[in-house]
Image (cartoon, rainbow, N blue to C red):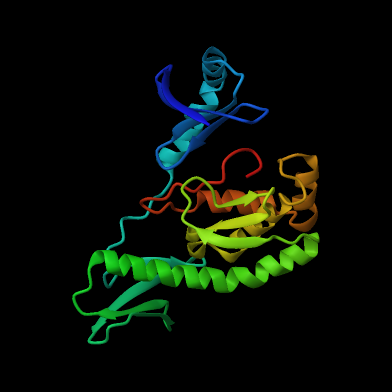
Amino acid sequence: MNTEHHTIGSLTVEVRWKSIKNLHVGVYPPDGRVRVAAPMAVSLDAIKLAVLTRMTWVRRQQAKFAAQERQSVRRYQSGETHFLWGRSLRLEVVEWDKAIYRVSEQRGDRLSFQIPRESSFEQRAAWMANWRRSQLRKLAAPKVTLWSDILGVTPEKWGIRDMRTKWGSCNSRKSIIWLNSELSKKPTPSLDYVILHELAHLISSKHDDRFLAVLNEHMPRWRSIRAELNALPLAAWEDTSIPGPTR
């Protein structure tokens, strides 16, 4: 894969030449960066023309991202709001003399975060991320099994990753599914949608009619769920919108 950056109109565009059949222009949050994936044989002039002809759409997408609500940077201090499965929880940090940490939901929409004294920001962030991953894995595991059985597919492996451009991904050749670690913050229907979406790629690797038929049959509201997911507040670092007309 060959990657270059070019100025096209007033845009700085990342261009990636790949072993693919069709050219794709994507606009990604949080700042509306533009990236083109192009077949190896497509010239730079053809790519520039493709971007220029889509300029109105590109600007519209960038305006949406600019207007989208964003969470402030979390410092993992008492009083902050943290999200779990779409619910807002008030963080309560308790320092103790133990060398371990513990995170637990409390009554009254509180999230208790018990940590060793004088813990650093990096430690707090890592501990909270580990807890979130454990919550996501606990809820996602039976859902992956359920949707796999419904679709009649069997992924060789599934896991959780920090991803900046997708809510999920599927390597259909190796039959591997990945879920974005940020999904623990989103409502549970979003998790079902992403799992179904990625498993459907084991039936069709493309976003073609066969793929869409799977989503339409098993989750008729998938388009509205996807829209709700992408309209939710972005984390300060987040870059995870499912791009394109079907993601």
- The spot of residue 88 in percent (x, y) is 43, 68
Which residue sits at x=49%, y=31%?
A: 35
Which residue sits at x=68%, y=54%?
A: 175
* Occupied quadrant, residue 132: bottom left
* Occupied quadrant, residue 104: bottom left
* Residue at the outermost top position: 45
Residue 96 shows in this picture: yes
- The spot of residue 11 in percent (x, y) is 41, 23
Count of marks placed on residues: 0
- The spot of residue 75 in percent (x, y) is 27, 63
Residue 14 shows in this picture: no
Which residue sits at x=35%, y=66%?
A: 126
Q: Is residue 211 left or right of residue 245?
A: right
Which residue sits at x=48%, y=63%?
A: 185
190 relative to 8, above or below? below
* Residue at the outermost bottom position: 97
* Occupied quadrant, residue 93: bottom left
- The spot of residue 115 in percent (x, y) is 28, 79
Q: Quadrant of the C terminus?
A: top right
Q: Nearer the viewer, residue 219 or 22?
A: 22
Q: Nearer the viewer, residue 141 or 53?
A: 141
